[in-house]
Amino acid sequence: MVFSTASRGPLKAEMNVTPMIDILLVLIIVFMVVVVSAFQSKGLEAQIPQPATKADNATLARTIVIQLASAGEDKRPALKINDETLAWDQLADRLVNIFAQRAERVAFVKSDDDVDFRYVAEAISIAKNSGVERVGLLSKTDAESQ
């Protein structure tokens, strides 16, 4: 507050608003930075399976699907690559042979509902170690549309 002691008239009390304006400007800048950084954040990239179209029928022959069929309680599930039945110890070699000539290294894993996830994880691990770059999981609706 400023007081005038001159004899020009009555005393006037004036508020100095300069510090308040400085604080408000700093707050506006902080909020602008927070808002801009929130819009620039990017999450993880995910590939979502798309429904099959007629143009995709040619690529279905190239699609590799590792199928796990339930063999009963506490038993290792039966294993197929597309329609070829395999033993578990042959899976790695077969995948290496399949993907030796392919530029696109993508495989899908499909299993029955009652197959333990540890077997699904083991199939994914074997596929990754055999040179498959991307492994997708197929649900019942994905498998039925093919």
Image (cartoon, rainbow, N blue to C red):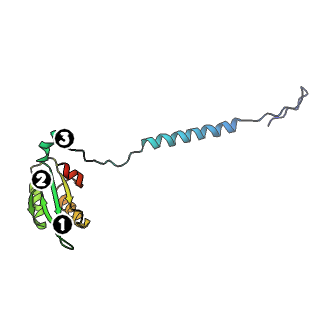
- Number of marks in the rendered image: 3
The image shows residue 24, relative to residue 106, as above or below, that is above
71 lies left or right of 118? left
Is label 2 in a helix, a strand or a loop? helix
84 lies left or right of 133? left
Badge 2 vs badge 1, beta-carbon distance below 8 Å: no
Q: Of 134 and 56, which appears nearest the observer? A: 56
Q: Looking at the image, which residue is at 12% across and 55% down?
A: 82
Q: Where does label 3 land, which residue?
A: 53
Image coordinates of residue 78 in percent, x first then y, are 14, 66
Q: Where does label 2 land, which residue?
A: 99
The image shows residue 86, relative to residue 32, as above or below, that is below
Badge 1 vs badge 3, beta-carbon distance below 8 Å: no
Q: Which residue is the extreme one toward the right? A: 7
74 lies left or right of 17? left
Q: Return the disc, 2 or 1, that comes first in the chain's sequence.
A: 1
- In the drawing, what numbered circle is on residue 70? 1
Say which amino acid is labelled 2.
Answer: Phe
